Image (spheres, coloured by chain):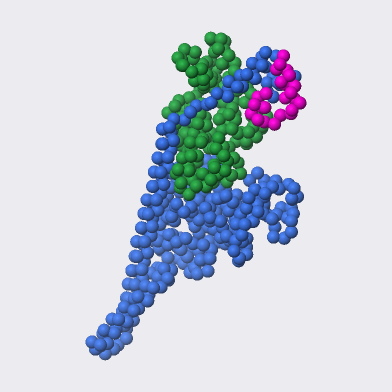
Chain colours: A green, B blue
Amino acid sequence: MRREEDLTADIEAARTGDTIAFERIVRAHADAVYGHALRFFGEHQAAEDAAQEVFLKVYRSLSAFDGRSSFSTWLYAVTRNVCLDLFRRGKRRPLPVDPLAAPDPAVPDFAEGVTQARALEAAMASLAPEDRDALGAVTLFGLSYAEAAGVLAVPVGTVKSRVFRARRTLLHLLSEDAKGGVA
Amino acid sequence: MDCVQAQQLLSEAFDAELVDAARLAEAKSHCAGCPECTGFARGLLVLRTPGPTAPESLIGAVVARVESEIAQQAAAEAAAKAAAATADTRRAADGAAAAASATAAADSAIPRKRPSRWQTGWGIAAAAAVVIGFAMLTQYGIRLMADPFGTGQEAARTANDSVTSTDLGSAPAPGAESQSQGQRYAEAAKAPAFVVFRGQVYRLHGSRETSGAAVASIGSVKTARDGSGSPSAVTVYSDPTSSNGLLLPSEGSAPSYVAFVPVTRTLKGRTYVLSSEEDIDRFGEWPKLPSKYPEPASPDGSPIFFDGGADDAGAKIFVPRGGEAEDGFAIAPSMPAADPSAGNPNWTWWSPYF
């Protein structure tokens, strides 16, 4: 994780048109933005298109970022809004919730970590959107519960509950996968 | 403590949220004797698996699009400057021609003897001096001579000027029926008391008496307030009564403050804030467009902006070439009294408010 001072310096530089500084910002946050979009749309091309739109908006709005919230909080809000806008404009469809979604144990992989990551992402499709949102805000973007509550416009207690519920659901699905089937 | 309570506490602690130490200890103690909760705690480590990795192509594509946008804006600026330079040249030529014909008309009204060659030469030189003299008048003076009552075409040409309230003192008397420069000046009221904080414009909203303990310093603005001196940094504080307001210390004694609120409008339900790249040095001055957007040469926003529809209050918005309204938009000068930018003689820029 880059130091906050480095990020602040890069933001100031990017505001003046320094594309190298902006590229550093993009690299530091691309995984979080892409991850959120991928979980929202469930498809790589749609996620990549949405992530591009997010970073373009970030670039165009850098002068409006006043630093009152953390950059990650602001970026999460932009990411969430872009995905919702693309859905509302009919340009992309979000991943439908699949309560029976289960990790595919037949996918051949040679690294347990890769298998686990794929299983986890597949299980994400089973989460209620609001639970997935809250979990992503905390685990992908590193927001505190209070910051996530501010962006999602819900009480902090609601964020706590959604994150907890998301984890319980994911662990249940992953344990079912380990047993070799969906209950 | 039951399993749900214990697991929820572990989940919060896992996210580095503040939890009661005694309750957390109780949860851990519960886990020691509960296989399900132990499994949940271990599962939290599994869930720590890194999320999706963005493809390298994404980063390259973003940078390419940003660089393309920068190049397009530079081209638009160059085109606008070229259009402005052409307009200036035309105005100077018009003014010189008007001066020359005025001189010729004056000469023809006076009966005189047939001039000698010597007198003709000096006459031509004198006429040339008059032409040069008039051509050296200020741009404003030439505009007045060329079009004293202000036509729509004239208003379009002069829309290139960056007008501040200090120019209002030299403005002509309001002219005729059309939306002329003179009419714009007449409608341009003294600006509200503005300050700029982190690129966003705030207007004076009233005074606030509050305990110093209730406010927190969040930065500073640069302003001379309503004084004539140089602007200086003034500490700003969060307003405990407002989620988005600012407080500046009163020029009298604390704990009095003056409150400022962001100047906003909405588009499709989303809030946009009046933005300014530069500090507004003192109350009564207006913000301008960001430097990357030259003042349009025409009231319809061209060549910089095109019609972007209207905001939620029906005010016409203008969008940069290649841009989208939701990323920010411009508002034309001379907005009516009910508009948040009423009376502004400049184009203004409005950014998404987060």
Q: Position of residue A115 (x, y in %)?
A: 50, 18
Tell me if residue B297 comes above or below residue B59 in the rendering: below
Give the residue at x 62% y 26%.
A163
| Extreme-bottom residue of the structure | B113
Instruction: Report the residue at 32% width, 72% height from top.
Output: B97
Quick one: B70 or B181, which is closer to the camera? B70
In this rendering, the answer to whether B173 lies above or below A101 is: below
Q: Position of residue A120 (x, y in %)?
A: 53, 20
Q: Please identify the quarter of the rendering in which residue B266 is found.
A: top right
| Viewer-proximal residue among B185 and B52 | B52
**Residue A98 visible at all:** no
* Residue A138 found in image quarter: top right
In the picture, measured across the screen, residue A23 lies left or right of residue B126, that is right
Image x and y of residue A69, in percent: 60, 41
Between residues B337 and A13, which one lies in front from this camera angle?
A13
Q: Which residue of the protein is positioned furthest toward the left in this rendering?
A: B117
Find out whether residue B31 is within the magenta segment: yes
Q: Where's the C terminus of chain B, which quadrant?
A: top right
Magenta segment boundaries in residue numbering: B10-33
x and y percentages locating residue A140 in the rendered image:
55, 30
* The magenta stretch spans residue B143: no
Q: Main secondary structure of the magenta part?
A: helix
Query: Residue sitting at 54 percent across and 42 percent down?
Result: A6
Any part of residue B40 in sight: yes
Q: Quadrant of residue B86?
A: bottom left
Number of numbered tags placed on the structure image: 0
Q: Which quarter of the image is occupied by the N terminus of chain B?
A: top right
Q: From the viewer's perspective, is B142 left or right of A80?
A: left
Is residue B113 toward the left or the right of residue B40 in the image? left
Q: Residue at x 40, y 63 (%)?
A: B154
